[in-house]
Structures are given as C-alpha cells and as structure tokens.
Amino acid sequence: MGLNRRNFIKVTSLGSGGILVSSMIGLQACSTTDVDTWEPNFFIKIDQTGAITFTCPQSELGQGTSTGLAQILADELGADWNQIKIELADGSSEKFPNTQGTGGSNGIRKLWVPLREAAAATREMLIQAAARKWKISIEDCYTKMGYVHQRDNANKIPFGELLTSVKTEYPPTDLKFKDASDYEYIGSSPSGPKNKKIVTGALEYAIDVSVPDMVYARIKRSPVFGGRVKSFVSTKAREIEGVLDIFEVEPVPIPEEDDFLGGVRSGVAVIADSYWKAIQASELLDITWEDGPNEAKNTDTVIADFEQKKSQVNSLNTRANLSIAKTISAAYKIPYQANACMEPLNTVAHHKGTEIEIWVGTQAPQMTRWRIAQFTGMPEASIVVHNKIAGGGFGRRFFTDFVEEAVILSRKVKKPVKLIWTREDTIATSKYHPYSIEYWSAEFDTRNRLLRFKNKGYFTRASNYPSYLYGKPIAFHESIPHMAKSVLPRASWRSVMAYPWGFAMESFMDEVAHEMARDPLELRLEYLQNADVSGLNRNPDSDYQLDAKRLRRTLEVAKEKANYKGTKQGQTGVGVSAIMYNYSYCSHIAEVSVENGRLKIHKFTSVVDCGRVINPSQVKSQIEGSIVWGLSALMKQVITVEEGKVQQSNFHDYEPLRMIDNPKIEVHIVETDNLPTGVGEPGVPGVAPAVLNAIYNITGIRLREAPIEEALREQLITGLA
Amino acid sequence: MISLKINGKPYNVEEDPKTPLLWILRDIIGLTGTKYGCGIGQCGACSVLIDEQSRRACMLPIEMLDGKSITTIEGLSDDSGLHPVQKAWIEHDVPQCGYCQSGQIISAVALLENNPNPSEAEIKTAMNGNLCRCGTYPRVEKAILTLKNDGDGIK
Ligand code: FES
Ligand code: FES
C-alpha cells in the first residue's frame, strides 16, 4: 500500500480506514520543541535512551492484544523488545478514529496494517536521518534491535541519538513492509512488560488508582431493574466514622437507541474515607423501594411466556418443492448469565467543574468519553478518559453505566471519587447476557439424506452473522429479538451472538449425524469439504474471506491429535464441535465420562487457525481460557429472578469453574500465512456443544439447556433408578 | 491500636479493629497488589501469607492479627530478585488479565513451602480456592509442577 506524502503533513478528514492518515503527522515532529523525545505518530514515542513507548489504542483485558500489537510494532520498526513500553491510549476519536472499541476479537485484525504503516514510516525516517549523517544512501542502511546499521560494515547508531536530526525528515512516499522471513518477534512468545508487573503486584488497575483528596463510594442500587428509591433513612449509616456523605442517585434510563450507553439504576450512594466504611454504611441504610413494572416478575414465568409467543409463530415454514420425508427439530436454551469479571466494575472520576478526568478499565474509552460528554453537556475536549488494564472485560466493560455513576457522584461531592461495585453488585444489580432460545430443524429425503436446515434464532439471515460454513441450504425463518430490557438489562458476553448460535448449531449437527447414522466428525468433514460459502462474505472486496476448508483443516488436525476413533471409546464419550468466529477457526474434541452419577470432563483437544500467529503462547492461553469460560457457563452459572430480584449474589451461588474440575487442555495451532485474526473469543462457542455431544454419546442423554449440572444429575439418578 | 508487621515493616494501625486486613492493606497502607474479588472468602484474590499459610485478607479483621507477620505479593521479591514462583509464572506466561494472580502466587508459595513435592491432585486441591475468570488453571498447574523439588525447575 503506497502512502501519499501529503497525508503526513496535513491532518485531513478521515475515512473509515483513516487511522494512518490521522496518526502520521509529520510536521508534528518538525514543530515539536521537546528535544528529549520524538513522536512521529500517535502510536510511537522514542526517547533519548532509545526507549520506545507504544501507545496502544486497543484495551487490554487479559486477552494479550497490547503485547501482540507491540510485537508487530517492534518487528516492523526494528526495535529491541526490551526497550518497548506499552501505554494504553486515552479515549480519543481525534487520534484513533473508529479503532478504540475492543470487542469481537478484532484488535490484531484491525491494526495489522495501520500499525505496520506507522512503524515502517518511523523506521524509514530514522534510516534517512542516519544515512544523511553518514552521507550514504538509504539503501545501505537497515534497522535492528533499536539501531540503524550500515549494511556493509559494523557502523551503527542507536535510535535515541537520531532524535534531533530525524525531526527534519519527512516520511517516504512509498513504504515497504518487512518480509515475514525477517520477523524476530512475530511468531514468538516474548514475555510482555505486563507480566513482570503482575507477578509483583505492581500492575495498577483502575481499582488501584489513587489521586489526592480522593474519596470512596458504594451505591446501594435498586434490587429490581426499573425500580427506584421511594425514601430512605440514613441515621445508622451516618454513625459510622469516616462517612462523608449519603445521597440519592437519580436513575438515568438506558438510551433506547443504544443500550451500550449505560444508564444508571436508582440508588443511594455512600461516600466515605475508605471503601470498607462505604460498604458497611451502605448496608446500614434503611431504604424503601418502589419496585416498578418488574416487581412481580420471575424468570420462569417471563421465559415461559416468551417461549410460548415465539413458538406460536408457526414452527418453521416449509417450501413445497422439496420432497421431504422426515423432519427433526430441537430447541436450545441459554439462561441469563453474568460476566462477573474478576476485577469488580469500578471507576475513579474527578469532575473539576469545567473538566472531567476519568480512570477506568473499559473496552470503549472513546465511546465512554463521548457518552460522558453527551451526558454532562460538556465538550468532549474537556473530558479525559485514561484507560487502564482491566481485570477481565468479556463484553461487560463495553457498557458505560459504571462510569456515568462515578461522574454523577464526583459532580455532587466535588472531589475525585473511587466508585467500586461490590461483588454482590456485579452479580445482583448488573447487566446480563440475555436469555436466548434457538430453534433448529433439519429436513431429510426418502433416502435419509439431509436436504436443508432451518433456523429461528437471533440472526435474520445467514449473512448477518456468517458463521455457518456447512454449505447445506439453510433457511432463516425468523429472528427472535433478545429479551433485552424486559426483566434484566442486556450486556455483551465473550463471543456475543456466536455463543447461543454455536451452542445450538453444533449440538444440532450432532443430532443430524445420529439421525443419519453417520459419525458426527466425518459428516462435518464431508460437508465442509464441499461447502460453497462465498455467498456469506459480507464484503466481497475485503481481504478477509470465509473459507470452509480452513475450518475443515482444524477439525482434521483435532481428529488426528485426539486420536479420534469414533464417539464412544470404552467408558469415554467423545464430542466434537467446529466453529468460525470473525475469520478465526476453531475445533474442539471433548472427552468425558460419568462416574458414580457424576460428570467428569477429562480432556479438550482444541485446534485453532487464526492466520499468521503473532504470539503462540497467547494464542494457546486464549483458547485455554475460552474453554474454562465455556465450561463455567455450561456447568452451573445461571441468573434467576424472583419478584423482580436476582437470586444470586456472589461466587458461592454463581460459581465459575474451579481448578479441581478443570480438564486437561491441549491446544494446537494450524499455522497459515493468512492475515492474522483474533483469538479471544473463537474458542468459546464450541465448548458447550462438544461436551454436550460427548455426554450424549456416553449416556444417551441429550441436554439442550444450560446450565446442565443439576439437570444431568437428576437424569442420571432417574436413569439409575 | 493494632501492631502488624507487613513485608518486614512494622505498622501501628488505628482503624476500627473489625476492619478486614484487605482494606487496611489497600486503602490505608497503599499496598494494592492484594486484590478485592468477592469479600466473602470465595475467590482467593486477596490471599496473603500468614504463618506460611495462604489466608484470605477479606475475612481477617485486624483485631485477630495483632503482632502477626504478614507477607503480601509486594513482599515476595526483594532486591536480590523475584521469588522462584514469580519467575515460573513469567516463564510459563501464566497471567492473562492478572487480577487473580497475586492470590494464585501467594497460594502456590504456601503450597510449596508446606509440601515441596505436591502431586497433581494436591496442587488442584491447594489451589481450588483461587478462582480465575480468565481460565489460567492449566498454566498455574504447569508452573507449580516445574517448581516441585523433583520438577524440571525453572530453565
Ligand atoms: S476477596 Fe477475599 S476471597 Fe475473594
Ligand atoms: S488472570 Fe484474569 S482472573 Fe485470573
């Protein structure tokens, strides 16, 4: 991709791929008066010692994007890994248009080209400065390990010594990317700077931020979504020494047009000089609530009602011209679930009157800034959102509600406020992955051959969410809207829509295979071999195109690595799944057994193809984590509502998988030189179906609703009796 | 007033004696490496070492700790370098978000001090109280296995 010199010296308006234009402000370098550092663009800052600060526009939530992107930058620049520092960018639509939302496993994919452009331009300017100094041609220079080298002798000069002269250089009009064979960091697993901070307890999350004069806050929120404070008595709470203020927080409705934009529940805030006191005092509040429209609602009845309405809409329609001999159908259900990130939601906000400064671990620093501006009526330019590494995000930190709250509190008390949600708050008064139900059916001809699938679920058509790669005709009959604001508000979830979709599709594929008396793995291989998925590509001109063969290859490798010999081997049930998610491909083979009426998940063999691998250790750890995430969600995690109130409150009754139940996990990577794609989520959707299929194979019990732990136990007991 | 020794340094704490150690560490002393995860002893994010045991700081009112020595994650390493468990954690690229990891490391240190040769089952039991929402369990286990007396050690 060629670069236009003009782009560097003029900040032009930005198209959708505008990051390069925006980041390359060559004149910025010329006009800067700072002699100690050089900032050729918004990604890179080099100082006299040669230290290179990478300003990472993507959020770091543990998925490793910041490390992976830093590797890309270090390689293209010719930097020394040990001199790379990573800083998360403040929310800025000016500097990083359209590139700061972290979700959909898109970080590497979005920045693969623009980041290398920025690094390559920087590299060339350093080379020009060195060549001019040495009075040789730029062709005779290259960069490596933080130096510009001469090709034919040992002369070299560190980047840090070129800072003055490089500032008069212009970026070249044509850029060449490094050849993959010259990569030193891409494809290896250097330890990122964050690990050393983590193991010494030195990594500062938003919850650890401390600013002068800061006070602590907890809000006791309405236990019923849509309810509000009627009145409250705070006498007892005020007796706690260190309590500074107690006041009502007015609700802010979730915006109709976009429920990412937070909204605030009605509640009572306690401000204190330590968080412990704020919690204690908030528990001593005597609040009378007006529970509102949800007061009498229970999840059971709301869901039953929802299902009834949805299933009334005919079953799945039929087309007359097919000679259908047989139809099988199934419905798959996922309950309300809470993300429960390990770091509870929190924000430090300082409303200074005409400016607001915010420290928060968010997946959406840019949108947060925009929202707070809209919310307070202040210009975006007066709002600073410092994005901190977050203790997990999983979709929940894409929402701005907890930041809005902190800003409201700080505006009221005129001090910096650290608002922390208790664990109970994150489970009982949060936003949730919504209840979902997926209907599938399959039609067969007289010779028991599959004619087509039908699906009624959350997609209006296959191309809306192109993760169906089997190539068999599929009819999307009807899209079911999520029960978004009915009884609980909606949050995103690791792998978003692909989670219910994969759960259902990959379970149903297994049911189809059994119906056809075929091996479920072999049947998938056969369909994927012959699948034409070109019609599913959303943008035919995109560099990213779906490829059923790549999914097939992951399944083939899984078959080989797991030594797959059919779905039942002695006392072990074996289950398979294969899923594409945002251009990454992942297959799982799960092995389970049932001993003394108890399910044991022994092993996962998982294979991923995410194109060019940036950091294999991180790729594997993301798949490992996805399996743990998927198993937690499958086994026990459920949020239920009675009389409008969430019944779960902490990790004792909303329990993630623990180490004792963790299976052996073996992850393999199919490395290709396709463009790199993400790995934070593609491992998730196939976890549940692989286990469910394995359970079916060993017990004959077909479970179609999460969580399964209790239902399975009951069915096994009935079976034994 | 309650006297505590934290990472070798003496502190006299004048807060409400019912205050859990966690909040004294984080909000009063400013040692924020010890994390708040659940407040009810379920997650292990707040683990600290007391008498060579991994204890939950969110469940320990300071009045129970008068005169005790406490080691937090910040006290594991010193000028001579990282603790072997910390090194193994880096070596095996264990952390993801990292939020649970100070607790994981403290529990691993306690395990290995009391049982230098834990079996896989013993590791799982000892670490079962430390939740990790990112799912780093396979690597936690692997890192501890290499630290066993008869393990591979740290390369
Ligand atoms: S915060 Fe102490 S165990 Fe969870
Ligand atoms: S590393 Fe994120 S919770 Fe354990």
Image: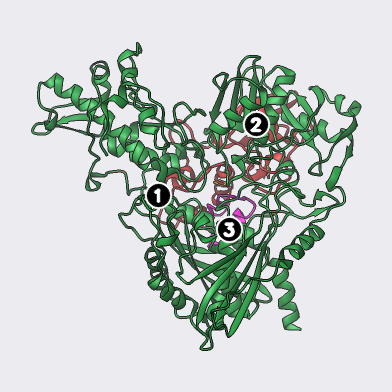
Chain colours: A green, B red
Task: Name the spot of residue A570 as percent of width and height, x first.
Answer: 53, 83
**Considering the image in quadrants, where does the N terminus of chain A appear?**
top left
Q: Amino acid at mark 3?
A: Phe
- The disc at residue A459 is 3
Task: Name the spot of residue A117 as percent of width and height, x first.
Answer: 31, 35
- Magenta highlight on residue A58: no
Frontmost residue, A144 versus A482: A482
Circle 3 residues within 10 Å: few <14, some 14–19, many ≥20: many
Frontmost residue, A685 versus A146: A685
**Residue shown at 71% from the left, 20% from the top:** A411
**Residue shown at 25% from the left, 36% from the top:** A2
Residue A563 appears in the figure? no
Q: Which residue is mark 1?
A: B154
**Residue shown at 66% from the left, 44% from the top:** B55
Q: Amino acid at mark 2?
A: Val
- Magenta highlight on residue B127: yes
Tag 3 secondary structure = loop
**What chain is tagged by disc 1?**
B
